[in-house]
Image (cartoon, helix red, strand yellow):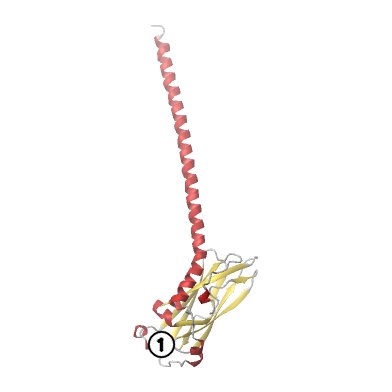
Amino acid sequence: MYFKPYRNLFSVCTRHIHSNVSRVLFNRYYDSAHNKNLRSSRLYWSGFGVLIIGLSYAAVPLYRIFCQSYSYGGTLSAGHDSEKVSTMQPVHERVIKVSFSADTAATMQWNFKPQQQFIKVLPGETALAFYTAKNPLNEAITGISTYNVVPFEAGQYFNKIQCFCFEEQQLNPHEEVDMPVFFYIDPQFAEDPGMQNVDEIILSYTFFEAKDGMKLPIMNYLKGQ
């Protein structure tokens, strides 16, 4: 009879100790699992970020090779006929408005813009336009650009004789440069029924920040351009 209260008290203390130990073990297990999940998430997102950056740099040379091989997006194809430029005749019946657009990638801090909103050209005549790029930072930045032509179907007729795309451009701190684009629209543009309702072509450039000393891999059959 005298030991019954002590037995009850001992039972309560035992259950209390057991509950505390279980709670401590559970918290330790939860914290360990939570920290492990956080580390896994950090590693996952870090790897994903590295992959995106790598694809951004790889996209430039791959885009150039594809466009130059298939004359996609207004890129000069291999074996461009320079004699045609000097002998082609303008098509006065068609006047095309060529608009200019400029953009920069998220990591590129240049100020980049076209000097003219648009110019009007004839198929079969050459035209010259300019873009301006400025580095507002206190350190040198190297950039590289891609471009696109809209509508895409008109890309096969849009030919650039000289431009600044796919080549590294380094600007010193606060340096500003003019970048020319010398181009023409093939006279066959006027003979294509699919281009009958196309009166405006948009030439768009996008600048990316390039790694110092990065060289674009160009296939041998493209080096003669």
Q: Position of residue 24 (x, y in %)?
A: 47, 30
The secondary structure type at the circle numbered 1 is helix
Residue 180 spot, x, y in % from top left: 56, 80
Looking at the image, residue 96 sits to the left or right of residue 136; the answer is left
- Snapshot quadrant of residue 109: bottom right
| Residue 112 vertical placement versus 191 (above, below) | above
Q: Is residue 95 above or below residue 130?
A: below
Image coords of residue 203 (percent x, y): 47, 78
Instruction: Locate the N terminus by quadrant.
Output: top left
Is 174 on the left-hand or right-hand side of 158?
A: right
| Residue farthest to the front, as pictured | 220
Nearer-the-camera pick, 1 or 121: 121
Q: Residue at x 48, y 89 (%)?
A: 84
Of residues 167 and 107, the one nearer the viewer is 167
Q: Residue at x 45, y 36 (%)?
A: 30
Residue 59: x %, y % from top left: 49, 66
List the residue tagged with mark 1.
188
The kind of residue tagged 1 is Gln
